[in-house]
Amino acid sequence: MDMTGEQRIPAPQKEVWEALNDVEILKLAIPGCQEVDKKSDTEFTAKVKLSIGPVKASFSGEVTLSDIDAPNGYTLTGQGSGGVAGFGKGEAKVLLREEDGETIITYTAHASVGGKLAQIGQRLIDSTAKKLAGQFFKSFEAYFADKNKETDAGSAAPAQPATPNTGQNSANSCQILFWGLAAAGLTVLWILHT
C-alpha cells in the first residue's frame, strides 16, 4: 500500500513539530489508541484497538524515527502485530513547512500487511488508511484549535480531540501513524507518526 497526502495545521511549524513528538497529544489524536510509550528520543511503542472491515483486534507496534531534521521532518519505520488478525510493516516520510503562520504536513508512506488483514482486500485497506489518516488529522487540528481558544480566553483547561478516542471507529489509524504505531500506524503510517 502506498499513500501520500498533505494537511494544513493551524499552528506554527515549531509547535506542530513538538506535538508530533508528544506522546500525550498523539495518544489523544490516534484513533483507538490505548497506549503510546516513548522508549527513547527515536523509538516509540504503541497499542491500538481497531476494526478494519470484519477484522477487529488489538495491535502492538514499534516505530523508529530516523533522518531527523527538526522541525522540518523525519522518516518513520515501523512494524506491528495483531496476533491472528495479521501484521504490518512500513515506512513513512513526513515533511513540515510553514506557510502564512500555519504548517503544511506532507507525507508519503509505503506499508505492507499480512495475515487476515491481507485477505480483506487492498481496496478496503487503502480506504481504511485514508479514513484513519483523516480521523488523526481532524483530532490533531482540533488540539491546536482548542489550544488557540484557550490562549485567547486565558483558560488552562486541557484540549480534547474532535473525535472521541473510543476504539469503536470502523477502521482506525494510528496512521500512519504513529500514525499507525502498529499495524494501523503502519497501514496509515503514522499515518503519520501515528
Image (spheres, helix red, strand yellow):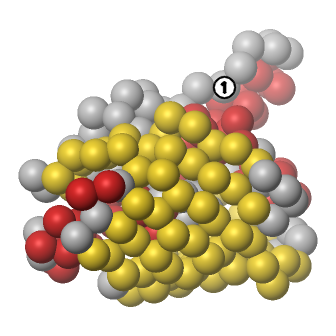
Q: Nearer the viewer, residue 11 or 81?
A: 81
In this rendering, the answer to whether 175 lies above or below 56 is below
From what the image shows, is residue 168 above or below residue 82? above
> Residue at horizontal 73%, vertical 31%?
147
Outermost residue toward the front in this view: 84
Residue at the spot of label 1: 159
Q: Nearer the viewer, residue 143 or 80?
A: 80
Q: Quadrant of the rendered structure where residue 118 is?
A: bottom left
Residue type, mark 1 in image: Ala
Q: Which residue is drawn at 89% across and 71% down?
A: 70
Q: Would you place residue 127 above or below residue 173 in this image?
A: below
* 49 left or right of 45 in image: left
Q: In this view, does 52 lie above or below 78?
A: above
Q: Which of 87 and 189 is in front in this view?
A: 87
The answer to whether any part of residue 106 appears in the image is no
Instruction: Tell me where residue 55 appears, x and y as whole percent.
Output: 17, 53
Residue 39: give x, y in percent of width and height. Answer: 78, 52
The N terminus, quarter of image? bottom left
Classify residue 22 as left or right of residue 114.
right
Q: Position of residue 115 (x, y in %)?
A: 22, 70
Q: Is residue 32 visible?
A: yes
Q: Where is residue 20 in the image (x, y as percent from the top left)?
A: 72, 55
Residue under the image location 44 percent in, 31 percent down = 165
Give the side of residue 77 with respect to residue 67, left or right. Answer: left
User: How many numbered discs sit on the rendered protein?
Assistant: 1
Residue visible at 63% across and 65% down in the picture: 63
Q: In what quadrant of the picture does the C terminus appear?
A: bottom right
Label 1 environment density (alpha carbons within 10 Å; few <14, some 14–19, many ≥20) = some
Q: Is mark 1 on a helix, strand or loop?
A: loop
